[in-house]
Amino acid sequence: MQMKGKYDKKIALDCKTRWNSTYLMLNTALLYKDVFERLAARAPCIPTGDDWQFAKDLCDRLKIFYDVTELLSGTNYVTANIFFPKITNIYLAIRKWQVSANPKVEEMSSKMKEKFNKYWFDVHGLMVVGAVLDPRYKLHLLNVLFLKIHGSEITSMEAVNKVKDILYNLVLEYQDTIEVIATTDGAQPRTSSAPNDMFEEDWMDTFDDYMSKQPDVTSTYVRT
């Protein structure tokens, strides 16, 4: 007996070096769970109930990689300013997965964190500069995210001060070479913004709470 319903997606094999491809494979396979169960009488190697549950748990965790990849690959809006908060979300998520009740998830998260750290410590400084230059967040964003990363106010402030040093050094490097270039065609610069869902992250709740406790004045940061 044929099953009712429309099944128009193909299950593709994942790529070992791309986490988002694994998400797409599992996400599509989960749509066909009932089909696999109907084949149980004919095929000897059908996923068990535990297998499906693990696939769902894994798919839910890998969704963050897929969403971030799609967002940062956008071409109709600026992305440099959102690198750091988005990558921070991944960093914190992987760290949270290490205390999972599922041993397979713990093992997976440990390997993911090891690979993630190779890139994190090399490029997070550049990503931070892009985030600070966003006039909506400035250094306030670093105060929030570094505190979530390090868990210590002293350590987080040390990290913020390192970013300040990077910014000051950049200014000193280019202060004698900056030239003002006037446009002659009178064309207005094109502006665009990222999708609204880029703000729908848990770190934004923490950031809003932090900003609500700040004095209602324009903050001026002075190097100490």
Image (cartoon, rainbow, N blue to C red):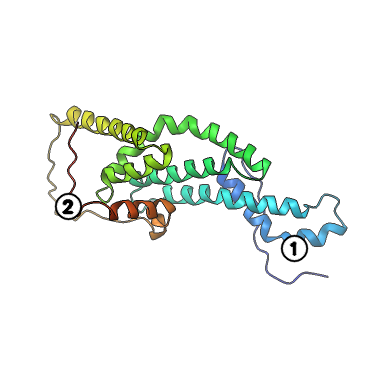
Q: Compared to 147, does 57 lie above or below? A: below
Q: Earlier in the sequence, mark 2 or mark 1?
A: 1
Which residue ends up furthest to the bottom in the rendered image?
4
Q: Which residue is at the front of the view, 214 or 199?
A: 214
Q: Is residue 157 left or right of residue 60?
A: left
Q: Which residue is at the front of the view, 176 or 112?
A: 112
Q: Secondary structure at mark 1?
A: helix
Q: Quadrant of the N terminus?
A: bottom right
Q: Amino acid at mark 1?
A: Asp
Q: Compared to 219, does 192 lie above or below? A: below
Q: Is residue 43 left or right of residue 155?
A: right
Instruction: Measuring from the top left, give residue 139's x and y in whole percent.
Output: 27, 42
Q: Quadrant of the C terminus?
A: top left
Q: Is residue 180 left or right of residue 191?
A: left
Instruction: Measuring from the top left, give residue 57's x and y in whole percent.
Output: 63, 51
Please name the residue that numbered disc 1 is placed on.
Answer: 34
Please name the residue that numbered disc 2 is placed on.
Answer: 217
Q: Image point 86% across, 51% down: which residue?
A: 44
Q: Is residue 70 left or right of residue 21?
A: left
Q: Image point 71% across, 54% down: which residue?
A: 52
Q: Image point 17% across, 50% down: which residue?
A: 218
Instruction: Measuring from the top left, give residue 220's x and y in whole percent.
Output: 17, 43
